[in-house]
Amino acid sequence: MSSESETVQVLACHAVTVAYAGLRAVSSVSFAVRRGEVVGLIGPNGAGKTTLVNAMSGFAQISEGSITLNGAEVSHLAPEHRAHRGLARTFQHGRLFKDLSARENIELGALAVGCSGREARRRAAALLEETGLLSLAGVPANELSHGDQQRVSVARAVVAGPAFLLLDEPAAGLPAESLAELGTVIEQARSGRDAGVVVIDHNVEFVMGLSDRVVVLDHGQVLVEGAPDYVRHHEEVLAAYFGSVATEGLSR
Ligand code: ATP
């Protein structure tokens, strides 16, 4: 793992374990993301990906290890306090305000971090355009497809200008033609806003294309970590995925 120097801003897990009634959903995982890099988090169903992101963002309690943000331990901070320190996330199931429009949901993401109404409207308008959601701006969230709800969720997280952005299956339900727009938004969060981004997705090709580095989880543990091309051809990764639906993007 990279060191947490004064200058490099890092979100890190140190030997983190999350246990549910005896099941170690995440088992002694060490993993870090620096600002300005995109890290893909992949693995078969039940590997522990969401649990790890829940632990990093404060939605799952860790039983061992620690989580640090720029060197300061945040393991016991509530999700909203981590959010105030610059950590934003999305959920597999959007968690949008169902009766509010796509635009209003995105504006709320900006208002929540203290933007004025005018600034929130400006940022939301820009993100609606970037995410390809402009034509759906006025549609209530509960009338959007799952894929479009995921896009709104990503925009709502990005609009806050976070230092770290954790995305749980942002491409789920999105048609192929919308993936490029989503990829651009994530890339802009990294390069334009210098965010450190963690992306979980079962579309392995999408994750590989975006990521500087990929971490593969299996049975709650880090199986392999490395550059996309290294991971793509790694025998243990292929074995872990064998028989799984999530093989797109892995070469055999
Ligand atoms: P998927 O790709 O299917 O979303 P995942 O890699 O994100 O899977 P997790 O959802 O983190 O995996 O689940 C890891 C393990 O922990 C699974 O065995 C799951 O059943 C279990 N688990 C997750 N959340 C809970 C919970 N709240 N209570 C009990 N067990 C849980």
Image (cartoon, rainbow, N blue to C red):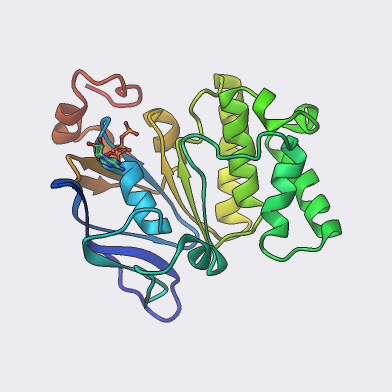
- Left or right: 53 in relation to 16: right
In the displayed image of the protein, which residue is found farthest to the front? 21
Q: Quadrant of the C terminus?
A: top left
Total marks placed: 0
Rendered residue at 82%/52% (across/down)? 122
- Left or right: 75 in relation to 171: left
Rendered residue at 61%/31% (across/down)? 149
In this view, 195 is above or below 250: below
User: Whereabouts is ligand 1, in terms of quadrant?
Assistant: top left
Rendered residue at 58%/31% (across/down)? 180
Place of residue 199 in the rendered image (x, y in percent of width and height, measured from the top left)? 43, 43
Q: Quadrant of the N terminus?
A: bottom left
- Left or right: 63 in relation to 209: left
In this view, 181 is above or below 191: above
In this view, 246 is above or below 9: above
Query: Which image quadrant is residue 178 in?
Result: top right
In the displayed image of the protein, which residue is found farthest to the bottom? 6
Rendered residue at 75%/35% (across/down)? 101
Query: Which image quadrant is residue 195 in?
Result: bottom right
Query: Which image quadrant is residue 111 in?
Result: bottom right
Place of residue 49 in the rendered image (x, y in percent of width and height, measured from the top left)? 32, 43
Given residues 132 and 83, the one toward you in this image is 83
Place of residue 18 in the rendered image (x, y in percent of width and height, measured from the top left)? 23, 53
- Left or right: 201 in relation to 237: right
Given residues 197 and 213, the one toward you in this image is 197
In this view, 26 is above or below 171: below
Place of residue 181 in the rendered image (x, y in percent of width and height, measured from the top left)? 63, 33
